[in-house]
């Protein structure tokens, strides 16, 4: 289980020590050998867990802590999509933002902007077509429209 003879020997010694200390808790509903095997397996699993944690700690010391991720707000401000949105006419940009960033339906957008639903639909279609042209070849264009 441990793939290392010395680790297996240490595990066996720890298992016998724990069994000796917990002998009063053993119940004769199962053979003592099975109880001892269960203790040995638990000791082996705990040992492997500790080894993995030590490996992670050593790796962190060697490589260093990961850098903090960039602030999503800052990334959004620099995105190709935001740059393209700024190039849209204000009415089209408002429709796109209300629809795709805030999740409003066409009816809700129509009420908010005090225009007919058909106007909202045509603004969204025009904005989408314009954004596709502006974002063509950029990463945002491939993710959003590709």
Image (cartoon, rainbow, N blue to C red):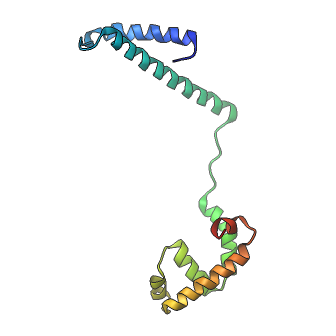
Residue at 65% over, 45% down: 67
Is residue 16 in sight in this rendering? yes
Q: Tag count in the figure?
A: 0
Residue 92 percent coordinates (x, y)? 61, 84
Quadrant of res 27: top left
Q: Is residue 109 above or below residue 138?
A: below
Residue 6 percent coordinates (x, y)? 56, 9
Residue 57 percent coordinates (x, y)? 60, 29
- Left or right placement of residue 34 versus residue 2 in this view: left
Q: Is residue 16 above or below residue 126?
A: above
Q: Is residue 80 above or below residue 14?
A: below
Residue at 69% over, 69% down: 141
- Left or right placement of residue 144 versus residue 104 in this view: right
Residue sitting at the far right: 137
Residue 54 percent coordinates (x, y)? 57, 25
Residue at 53% over, 17% down: 2
Q: Nearer the viewer, residue 74 or 16?
A: 16
Is residue 78 in sight in this rendering? no
Q: Nearer the viewer, residue 22 or 36?
A: 36
Quarter of the C terminus within the rendering: bottom right
Residue at 63% over, 65% down: 76
Quadrant of res 123: bottom right
- Left or right placement of residue 12 versus residue 91 in this view: left
Quadrant of res 16: top left
């Amino acid at each position: 289980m441990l793939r290392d003879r010395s680790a297996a020997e240490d595990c066996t010694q720890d298992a016998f020590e724990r069994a000796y200390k917990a002998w009063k808790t053993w119940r004769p509903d199962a053979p003592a050998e099975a109880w001892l095997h269960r203790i040995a397996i638990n000791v082996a699993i705990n040992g492997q867990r500790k080894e993995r944690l030590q490996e992670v700690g050593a790796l962190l010391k060697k490589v260093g802590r990961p850098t903090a991720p960039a602030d999503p707000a800052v990334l959004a401000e620099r995105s190709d999509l935001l740059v393209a949105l700024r190039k849209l006419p204000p009415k089209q940009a408002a429709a796109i933002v209300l629809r795709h960033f805030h999740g409003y339906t066409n009816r809700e957008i129509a009420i908010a902007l005090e225009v007919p639903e058909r106007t909202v639909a045509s603004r969204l279609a025009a904005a989408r077509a314009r954004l596709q042209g502006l974002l063509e070849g950029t990463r945002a264009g491939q993710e959003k429209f590709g």
